Amino acid sequence: MLELSAAAREIDLKYLDESGFCVWSEPGYTYYFKGEQKRLEQTKRRGRRLSIIGFLQPIISFVYGLVIGGVNRKSYIQMMELEALEAQKAGRIRVIVQDNGPIHRCKEVQQLWKKWEYMGLYIFFLPKYCSEMNPIELEWQHLKKDELSGQIFDDELDLAYAVIDGVTARGEKGNYSTQRVKFNSSSYG
C-alpha cells in the first residue's frame, strides 16, 4: 500500500538503513587467465570502521551521512529530524521504512515519534529478519561489490572519499540525486 501511495504521489516513501566499510574491502570475484593472479597488498593497520546511514527514495534521491565507528542514536536522530523538517516544509506525508535496530526503537527516539508524526514524518517498521524487503540493502551491496570491490585504502579518509565517490557514481547510474549530510560534532559521541 505504501508503494502504491508513493507511485500515485500521495506520499514520499523512503527506505532507511545503515552499513559499514573498512579500509580492507573484500576482494571482488573475477576471471583470470591460467597463470595470472590478482594481488592485493593489505595495509599494516586495519583501521576503524566507517559507517553510513542513508535514506533511499528510489529513482529520486539518496541522502546519507558518514561517521567513524558505528551509527549512534544521535546521528540517527539528526537524520530523522532533517527528514521531519523537510516533510513539514513540503506539507506532505513522508514515510520512512526501516528495520528494528536498537537505535530505531530506543527510549529517546520513541519520545520523538509523536513530534515527527505531527511534522508529517511516519515510521514503518519492517518485520524482523526481512532485510530483503528494504531496497536500500541492494544499494549497499552494489556500493561494496561494484564501486569499492578489491580496493585497499591507506586510511579512513581515503575510504570516506571512495564511499562518497561510489555513492555519487551510483546516483549517476540510477539517475537520482545524492546528498551528504554532515553531522554535528555532538553526534559523534
Image (cartoon, rainbow, N blue to C red):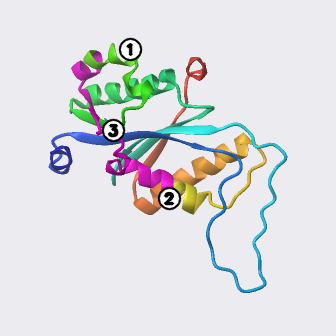
Measured as percent of width and height from the top left, residue 147 is found at: 58, 59
Q: Is residue 94 left or right of residue 24?
A: left
Give the label on residue 128, or none.
3
Give the label on residue 95, or none.
none
Taking depth in this image into account, of 166 and 103 the one nearest to the observer is 103
Residue drawn where x is 72% and y is 46% of the image: 158
Of all residues shown, which one is farthest toward the bottom?
A: 34
SS of the residue at dot 3? loop
Measured as percent of width and height from the top left, residue 97 is found at: 31, 38
SS of the residue at dot 2? helix
Task: Please report the bounds of the magenta region as a residue range.
Answer: 115-141
SS of the residue at dot 1? helix
Q: Quadrant of the N terminus?
A: top left
Q: Is residue 44 left or right of residue 11?
A: right
Q: CA distance from mark 3 to mark 1?
A: 19 Å
Sooner in the amino-acid sequence: mark 3 or mark 2: 3
Of all residues shown, which one is farthest toward the front?
A: 129
Residue at numbered disc 1: 107
Residue at numbered disc 2: 142
The label nearer to you, 3 versus 2, is 3
Residue drawn where x is 73% and y is 54% of the image: 152
